Image (tube, rainbow, N blue to C red):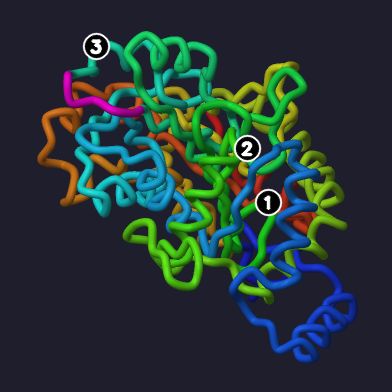
Amino acid sequence: MPSKDEKIFVTRPNLPPLEEFLPYLEKVWESRFLTNNGPFHRQFEAELSRFLGVDYLSLFANGTLALVTALQALRITGEVITTPYSFVATAHALYWNGIRPVFVDVEPDYLTIDPAKIEPAITPHTTAILGVHVYGNPCKMEQIQEIADTFGLHVIYDAAHAFGVTYKGQSVLRYGDLSILSFHATKVFTTFEGGAIIAQNEKLKERIDYLKNFGFANEVTVIGPGINAKMNEFQAALGLLQLKYVQQYIEQRKQISLRYQEIFEKIPGIRVLPHPGEIEYNFAYFPIFIDEKVYGTSRDAMYEILKQHNIYARRYFYPLITHFPPYRGYESARPEHLPVAEKVSREVLCLPLYADLKPEVVEQIGDIFKQHAP
């Protein structure tokens, strides 16, 4: 059992042995190359591309800057159809680009954007679809691409949760025009902060690389209004070392998730998400969905009960993006248009999940829920 004063948070970053990182830092000190496409940056970009099975990857300081830049790279304007069930940065990236978000509901099984809701939301101002691979579950990418091809739209995926996820043996990052990764401290793979854009052709990667460095094409030529979004050498060095361990982290997370699943599948009123065989999942999160009428206790009550035991789960995603002041005034943000998203946001609770989470904590969490079961 955890000690009385030990706090168990929803996630905790996995870091490699410090003694293995020190030689990388010594090389940074020797070279005095801190940023601007340094040797670790170039090496990490190449090795990460191979690891993920993609061809054109650009590293970024964080995932939000990557998403902001991705929209610029494709020259997206007007309206973009997206989901309310995501971290608010998904919508903020649109806002910062002067793009109007159009929110549509999510499908009930995996909580990704519902393709059946996309086509009715398309207007003459629609230029793109922005989907989110929620909890690492891929969107229905083939259906979304078919809609995009029919209407001449771009497709961008917020793949912040989807590091290493494959669909039918192929990286989910190979779908759409661009995909965005996050290497934030809460993610399966972390470089402290960090992110990446995955493009599908060399020309688009080249434009992205210009835009993330103020728009410079060379010393005297600026091709557009870029931004400073480069990953530094410290992040890249850590990323290189993390590649050595990430499969181990994912396997450890898998074993914890499987135990959670055994526990919660037997408790009436609690739903867990399925993982179909054609998807190689990364076990980024373990969300449960509490039906108060069946379980007998509300999600919010269980959230508070867990805190009394020093267990800090997270209601992720709650509130919906459409409940925040910048977005709730849109017609598409009205709750009656988003019944599935509204329902699951009131039911969801993400449980602690990280590679070195102690098995006894998992059992304690299960016991707490069993004690309040009908």
| Vertical order, 367 against 59 (above or below) | above
Q: Which comes before the other along the chain, label 2 or label 1?
A: 1
Residue wearing tag 3: 120
Q: Which comes before the other along the chain, label 1 or label 3?
A: 3
Q: Nearer the viewer, mark 2 or mark 1?
A: 1
Q: Residue at x 55, y 35 (%)?
A: 288
Residue 118, how many percent across, how many down? 32, 17
**Is residue 106 or residue 62 the one in the foreground?**
62
Residue 231 shows up from this direction: yes
Residue 240, how many percent across, how many down? 79, 63
Q: Which comes before the other along the chain, label 2 or label 3?
A: 3
Identify the image quadrant of residue 279.
top right
Total number of numbered discs in the rendering: 3
Residue 39, how many percent across, how many down? 75, 71
Q: Please tell me whether mark 3 sits on a helix, a strand or a loop.
A: helix
200 relative to 112 in the view: left or right? right
Q: How dense is the environment of label 1, judged by Cα within 10 Å: few (below 14), some, or many (20 and up)?
A: many
Residue 260 shows up from this direction: no
- Amino acid type, mark 2: Lys
Residue wearing tag 1: 188
